[in-house]
Image (cartoon, rainbow, N blue to C red):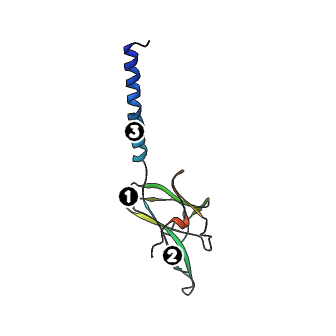
């Protein structure tokens, strides 16, 4: 038969296990980055020929609750460029409550495309392109 001290030790350990699980869960939720992900169409004009325009899908990351230091967007495991400069760049800093736009390639298949948002090497959100809500430009 177990002595009283051993029963007390077992009860203490069993009582603290849920507290540790709750602590780990809260720490994991605290590190989570939450933001809005939107899709829209935008008409771009060529710089050399103003009559030439192209209609392209864009993705907008909006209002993250924490800064995203090395934000990159992937379309079916292919990196996408940001819509800020003429030459593409693939990683940017998004501050808290700000945002950024990403150009999708011309002629993409929107039907079954996987979109991944990453902060450095860590994936913070995965979704299908058709699951992203469409908004006006």
Q: Is residue 65 above or below residue 83?
A: above
How far, Cα to Cα, is label 2 from label 1?
25 Å
| Quadrant of res 20 | top left
Residue shown at 39% from the left, 39% from the top: 22
- 3 or 2: tag closer to the N-terminus: 3
How far, Cα to Cα, is label 3 from label 2?
43 Å
> Which secondary structure lies at badge 3?
helix
Residue named by callout 2: 41
> Picture coordinates of residue 107 (x, y %)?
62, 74
> Which secondary structure lies at badge 2?
strand
Residue named by callout 1: 96
Residue shown at 37% from the left, 15% from the top: 5
Residue named by callout 3: 22
How far, Cα to Cα, is label 3 from label 1?
27 Å
- 2 or 1: tag closer to the N-terminus: 2
- Marker disc for residue 36: none
Viewer-side label of 3, 2: 3
Query: In which quadrant is the N terminus drawn?
Result: top left
Q: Is the residue marked by circle 3 packed among few (<14), some (14-19), or many (20+) residues within 10 Å?
A: few
Q: Is the residue marked by circle 1 packed among few (<14), some (14-19), or many (20+) residues within 10 Å?
A: some
- 3 or 1: tag closer to the N-terminus: 3
Q: Are marks 3 and 1 in contact (CB under 8 Å)?
A: no
């Amino acid at each position: 038969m177990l002595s009283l001290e051993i029963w007390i030790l077992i009860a203490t350990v069993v009582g603290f296990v849920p507290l540790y699980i709750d602590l780990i869960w809260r720490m994991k939720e605290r590190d989570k980055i939450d933001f809005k992900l939107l899709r829209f169409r935008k008409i771009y004009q060529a710089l050399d020929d103003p009559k030439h325009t192209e209609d392209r899908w864009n993705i907008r990351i909006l209002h993250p609750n924490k800064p995203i230091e090395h934000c990159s967007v992937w379309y079916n495991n292919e990196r996408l460029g940001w819509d800020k400069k003429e030459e593409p760049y693939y990683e940017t800093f998004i501050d808290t409550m700000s945002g950024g736009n990403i150009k999708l390639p011309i002629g993409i298949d929107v039907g079954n495309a996987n979109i991944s948002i990453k902060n450095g090497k860590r994936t913070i959100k995965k979704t299908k392109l058709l699951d992203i809500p469409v908004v006006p430009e």
